[in-house]
Amino acid sequence: MSSAGRLPTGGLIDRARPIQFRFDGRSMSGFAGDTLASALIGNGVGLVGRSFKYHRPRGILSAGSEEPNALAELRSGARREPNTRATTVELFDGLEAQSQNRWPSLGFDILALNGLAGGFLSAGFYYKTFMWPAAFWEKVYEPLIRRAAGLGRSASAEDPDHYDKAHAHCDILVIGAGPAGLMAALTAARSGARVILADEDSLPGGRLNGERHEIDGRAGSKWAATATAELAAMPNVRLMRRTTIFGVYDGGTYGAVERVNDHVAVPPPFQPRQRMWRIYARRAILAAGALERPLVFANNDRPGIMLAGAVRSYINRFGVTPGQRLAVFTCSDNGWRAAADAAAAGVSIEAVIDSRSDVAPALGADLVARGIRIFRGAQVIRALGSRALQAIEVRDHTGRVSSILCDALAMSGGWSPVTHLTSHLGGRPVWSEAHAAFVPGTLPPGMSVVGAANGAMTLARALASGRDAGARTASDLDRTVSDAPLPKADDEPASVRALWHVSGGRGPAFVDFQNDVTAKDVGLANREGYRSVELLKRYTTLGMATDQGKTSNVNALAILASERAQPVAAVGTTLNRPPYTPVAIGALAGHHRGKDFRATRLSPLHEWAREQGAAFIESGAWLRASWFPRPGENDWLESASREVRAVRSAVGLTDVSTLGKIDIQGPDAATLLDRVYCNTFSTLQVGRARYGVMLREDGFVMDDGTTSRLAADHFVMTTTTANAVGIMRHLEFCHQGLWPDLDVQMASVSEQWAQLAIAGPKSRETLTRIVDRQHDISDAAFPYLTAREITVLGGTRARLFRISYSGELAYELAVPAGVGSAVASAIMEAGKDLGIQPYGLEAMGIMRIEKGHVAGNEINGQTTARDLGLGKMMSRKKDYIGRVLAERPALVTPDRWGLVGLKPVDWTSRIRAGAHLIPIGAAATTANDLGYVTSVAFSPTFERWIGLGLISGGASKHGTRIRLVDLLRGTDVEAEVCDPVFYDPKGERLHG
Amino acid sequence: MKYSIFSILREGLRGGKGWTPAWREPEPKPHYDAVIVGGGGHGLATAYYLAKEHGLTNIAVVEKGYIGSGNVGRNTTIIRSNYLLPDNTHFYEWSMKLWEGLEQDFNYNAMVSQRGVLNLYHSDGQRDAYVRRGNAMRLAGVDAELLDADGVRAMAPFLDFANARFPIQGGLLQRRGGTARHDAVAWGFARGADNRGVDILQNTEVTGIRIEAGRAVGVETTRGFIGASKIGLACAGNSSRVAAMAGLRLPIESHVLQAFVSEGIKPTIDQVITFGAGHFYISQSDKGGLVFGGDIDGYNSYAQRGNLYIIEDVHEAGMALWPAIGRVRTLRHWGGIMDMSMDGSPIIDKTPIDGLYLNCGWCYGGFKATPASGWCFAHTIARDEPHKLNAGFRLDRFASGRLIDEKGAGAQPNLH
Amino acid sequence: MRIRCPYCGERSNDEFTVLGDADALLTRPSGENIEAFHEYVYQRTNPAGLHRELWYHSAGCRRWLVVTRDTRTHEITNVAFANSRGEGATA
Amino acid sequence: MADRTILNRSALAGLAKPGVIGAPTGNPGVRIREITEFAAITVIARRGRAAEVVEILSRHAGSPVADAAKRAGNASLSITGTAPGQWLVVARGAGNELDNMRADLNGIAAVTDQGDGRLIIEVCGARARDALAKGIAIDLDASVFKAGDAAQTSAAHTGLQIALIDEAPTFEMISARSTAESFWSWLVASAAEYGIEVV
Ligand SMILES: Cc1cc2nc3c(=O)[nH]c(=O)nc-3n(C[C@H](O)[C@H](O)[C@H](O)COP(=O)(O)OP(=O)(O)OC[C@H]3O[C@@H](n4cnc5c(N)ncnc54)[C@H](O)[C@@H]3O)c2cc1C
Ligand SMILES: NC(=O)c1ccc[n+]([C@@H]2O[C@H](COP(=O)([O-])OP(=O)(O)OC[C@H]3O[C@@H](n4cnc5c(N)ncnc54)[C@H](O)[C@@H]3O)[C@@H](O)[C@H]2O)c1
Ligand SMILES: Cc1cc2nc3c(=O)[nH]c(=O)nc-3n(C[C@H](O)[C@H](O)[C@H](O)COP(=O)(O)O)c2cc1C
Ligand SMILES: [Zn+2]
């Protein structure tokens, strides 16, 4: 084990708690408080990954979530997590990480050859070639490209961890717990406002933890800890560590993801890996800090070259150093602090190179005193070394180039405020020449920005802006803000003069590290006409990598601006979109996967059906009994056929509870029904039921069902299962929106009633045995289409409807849902000696086809009432929804596809739904397509396949022959077109 | 300059100094034979085919932003011709045919990749509807196959076959369907049109349509008036706004559809797969990102962004379909504004105003239509009458009832 | 998006179902003129700007609401019950 | 209510068994109880009669009932506003008191039986709010959602009526029978990390 990079003392890590981990199979150790990145540095590991396109060796660039280079696969097996930024992974015991996007190994990667061909693989090269021969694209080129592309590998087995979601509400959401955010949160919280303070880091404090500034005479990190403790103790504050605010949405909605257990190997039992939060905030204060920019010079991507602020974080927070001999290259005062921090930690400083010639002399005074080489007005033009930095070439202010040996280079190209979240609702940041950066422009409603995120780059100003915004926001929300003193901190020098691109060095100068976009690519895109920043982005893929250009975008825009000889302000920025950092798909899904993807609705008869051995099937939101296998039966068809025969010859019981049921009351109930159904309901007698058809306003059929009148001002409507929710909404719209003057009250009672269909010649006899004696259900007293409230089984309230879907003498019995299963069992018991059988969806489907009843396959939104043979129901005497548009020319032409029955001519032939209807002797082409088969069944009654279909001309085609052509399954069956009602066309049986 | 491996080698050796603009940035002329409003895929393709097929070269495409800033640059790249109704089937199949030779035609690699589009079904009813559709495709000469659950498993074993709320029963597969690189389609048409003399005017917003004596004579723009003998509108999500400049109201609502891309990962999913039990579809780009999406947000919007609940909804469906992607991360999500028509099908037609032509109503399916739409619109503009292929895409079909409603959802645009 | 239902208070838009342009949909023509119904059912102003639209509080009080919202920014400026034609009481 | 002579299954029959679920803690963060014996009706005022309905309901509740999303009543009878002019009345136990109410409301309001279609769960305990916040989007903070407050909303893709009965806090959740098992699955998954005691 090497401890090459670990400093002997210092840092906020817990040296008493060593941690073992593995990288590419090598065991290493670090300490509690380390990130994977700091631990790797501590172990002297410089080469961590490979870039996307050229497979260049890469190290660690940053110390935060902006990291473009140090991506690794974390964990293994089903928990393998590709593209994980080593800089954000908290070290835990047993952590396993692997480098990615390299083959066969990190040290030797074949595809690094791409780098040599860099001249040919310039931006967008793939748009210009791989076109010949045409067939080679899918077969040869594309597979090669795809294999080379991509980064890490995803897991191939189901993610074993679970995720959950939660909602939180607050007055003020503070995003970022650096000095500005902490100060804003403290000020707001002390006023009593409900505050949420979220930071993606595990340790609040922001830059304070990576720097050596003092606040009120104490280490900044100590101040942060104290502030955090105060906040944690306040009941009106929710402190959310390891929580990234990833997106801003409308109405003060913020998306956040909390990494609840990513800092341990496996989440403890019952705990999620991550939790997604929806935070509803009346106000937000963005205190997300600023990101340092790299400098763009030849080979600026060599492992060992790092952002200056990151070098400081590694030294000050983690007690590691990226090298023993450090050079610094900067265009801002900030870079000098890195040199000072490194020197203080005992790292040898080889040189400080500042591109500015007029640097305040005080800046490096102590370094000069220690004899460290200082270059002013100079630039690093090239880095040397390949898998590790070995030296840099410096061009001094006279133009002389010298080379300096070093194994680490800290670079600082200035700081860009983290304005990402200000753009999520479309706002664009604006260029500030003074900051040499984009600062927030139009903000999302309710948001203010403080600290470095707003260009307040020094500590004192960060604290002050945090306090001011905290106070202002709290008093905006009518809170009283007490005057607390502002903690004292220095306003350190922070001036900057941007240096966008150092030319003159040999080798690619990277702008976007991960996607390998160079300064030259930017120039090329511009030359080729991809001049809008957005086109530049898309053509070069700049800023489209996992870091979304956090460190690269501004440099690229500035280089583009200089290519175009325009100010940066005129070039503008690309749009930042959520998420701020990538979010695990599992976290955004939460609990709702597998069986919990969507709620399962169970019928009140579910228990009964289960006891009866039902085979269940997912049907929309419901789980429904499909058929009831019995010993000796081989498939569903055998079972369903038996069930049909039982109904047709004796009696069967099925569950129709899933139908929508709507209770409609009030003096104007009948009027409303007349307006929503195409047929009339105001004429319906009390105690009677009627089949109704509803149209959409565009004249097509929307739904059908029976509606019964229980009292003059009381109806119960049934809808199809699939449309139950939609019809309720539609009725409410008609009432509230169109005819609010009607005195109607509607309530869904779908959940309240279990509904059982008892069908077959012996249904009445069966029912008589459970209906309480005082209710006469004889044919005379209770004829077809009677609907009445009764009691069963000694006082259980029920509603009995004499309606029939099967075509037999049949009833539907509604009983309160709680007793549904018990009543069903009682009926089974009562009908036992009569041969009662439970029947399921399949049998129901067969019988409705035998009867020519339309269902979802026919009422598919494309058919009119006339198409379905229901035209006679369309009243001419009243207005109703859909009446007018149903008369449009194309809806009444005689060649429209109308409902018919279909019988294969060879009675042994099987037919299938979805086959199209082609005239005999004609070619199977669209031009000859006369319709299609909507539904089929094997009819046990007729012992043959029968079907329903829609055919051009409809009923006029009865008696003709047609082919049912199913090219998908290779069948072509001749059939006779017939009346859709196969069974008992006169309807005698249901009157029995 | 012709693009080829040779030009790449040559320029590679010369440091890329010889590459020239893919399209010019000309000043607007005072008058064009035709002005196409909208530099999206359809507008650019229209100009391209006007020049290529109809010999018109004095043409401008007027685009308010950069070309491809609309939906062509923000869609999930699926191309297919698996439609049900004849007007659509023939049109989209023609589009597919054009895709198949497009890159060689316009000399730009748009990465048209016929990797297959697989629509999963989860119930008998869904299966029947897919069989109906698949047969309609086959009658029209379009390829279609029906898979059972095992067939799906063989193609995509990583889907949830074990614990799904809506078990996968099978799928309708169109092998010739697939994806194409969205931006490259716009750029290829733009470059091809430019090569044939078309002026592409970026950052030029149309603010008015000048009509004199019942005839459209030009467009007011942020760069001044541009006269035109014929004006074609191809403004997708902004169609209602632009048509309103000519006093037209359309059977269109503008809705936001969101899309998502994950971090790049090594190849995992080969086809385009759509999940019939939730609103979800997914494929993997050549770069390695999983590209996926779901249902529209459902409310009228011009904001090019959506809200969190759809984002969650889409990810729930993703996890339900493919439970191993839990630890893959979503990298970015965005929205586009779509011209949702009242029957879910497009309009390519003349308008009641002479010299003004309309191309809109693409809903979330217009990317695949890009070549055929441009081709048919060019024909309609050049000949002043629709081609047979777009004869059904009429503006008056809502009044006549000759609707093209694939889903049967009726006049509710947010359900299409 | 957060909609302040006059009965239920402020809720996220996933509790609601949208139907579309309220001014169009609440003015159902009478009579039998196909053209009038064609306008009513199909033609939309589809403005970029303020839009009065129908939202149904499906997961809440099941009231139809008229929501005035800017389609460019999604900013909501008014919410009222539809049975008052969206006039009067606001929230 | 007629006497029930036959087995009446609660929506969660068999699932909400007394015992401990989830993280073992000495003191479970969440207590859950299914209310199995109750009757319920929806009351919807006829057009223009809401004020009279409020008066009648208040009389039965023994305390003022509002035409708003509030829960009024006592241990055995609760009346909760669910929409303008609309309430859900729940009578715990056999529910005989509903018959009188029904008679009083005759002609003034539409009354509909709902008790069989509902699941009622009470959730209390120190972590009840945290658990419920995992599905419920409304602000359940003690400073905002107070005893007597009620809301129609949803959790885990399922419609839901929630009210705060007391500041313990005890939440009452009323949901649909058909989705009871899925709802339960969500509730248990959400509360498990705090430890659950089903009583
Ligand atoms: C998220 C998403 C996913 C999608 N996925 C698919 C898919 O997988 N497959 C598929 O086939 N389709 C898909 N689509 C639909 C498809 O992208 C569109 O239907 C299609 O791109 C629209 O045509 P277009 O390319 O011409 O539109 P656009 O690219 O939007 O072009 C219209 C252009 O008009 C310009 N314009 C507007 N107003 C003016 C004005 N006043 N002056 C000047 N210019 C103006 C706009 O700036 C825009 O550039 C998807 C759409 C979205 C949003
Ligand atoms: N001298 C300079 O040039 C210079 C430049 C920049 C910053 N600084 C120093 O930086 C500090 C600025 O303070 P500050 O508070 O504005 O910033 P900060 O960088 O100290 O804190 C920002 C915090 O926001 C968090 N964050 C960012 N985006 C987030 C998101 N989406 N979700 C959750 N958390 C997120 C980060 O993790 C970080 O902790 C001062 O100490 C200042 O001295 C100095
Ligand atoms: C098919 C496709 C793939 C994409 N892949 C990426 C990607 O890998 N990285 C990325 O940052 N954005 C990707 N994007 C999203 C774009 O960056 C951008 O968000 C989108 O085109 C919409 O533009 P806008 O965000 O500028 O409005 C992709 C977009 C599409 C349509
Ligand atoms: Zn409401």
Image (cartoon, coloured by chain):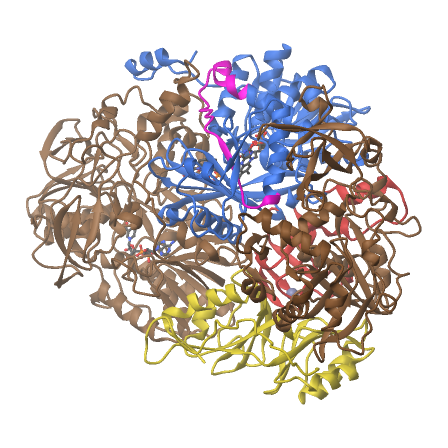
Chain colours: A brown, B blue, C red, D yellow
The magenta stretch spans residue A670: no
Judged left or right of residue A380, residue B276 is right
Q: On the rendered structure, is B39 left or right of A452?
A: right
Against A392, residue B61 (above or below) is: above
The residue positioned 22% from the left and 44% from the top of the image is: A98
| Residue A781 placement, left or right of A440 | right
The reply to whether the magenta stretch includes residue B119 is: yes
Q: Name the residue rendered at 76%, 80% in the picture.
A: D53
Q: In this view, does A43 lie above or below A535?
A: below
Residue A388 vs residue D153, the one in the foreground: D153
Quadrant of the picture in which ligand 4 is shown: bottom right
Where residue A266 sits: x, y (%)? Answer: 27, 59
Quarter of the view holding residue A832 = bottom right
Residue nearer the viewer, A784 or D182: A784
Residue stretch in magenta: B98-125
Is the residue A440 above or below the residue A716 in the image? above
**Quadrant location of the N terminus of chain B?**
top left
Left or right: B120 in relation to B389: left
Quarter of the image with the C terminus of chain B in it = top right
Tell me if I can see residue A617 in this picture: yes
Which residue ends up furthest to the right in the rendered image?
Answer: A877
- Comparing A206 with D184, the one in front is D184
How far across and down, in percent of the image, does residue A597 sit?
Answer: 49, 55
Classify residue A215 by image quadrant.
bottom left
Looking at the image, can residue A125 be seen? no
Percent of width and height locating residue A16: 11, 65
Residue C7, position in %: x, y?
A: 66, 69
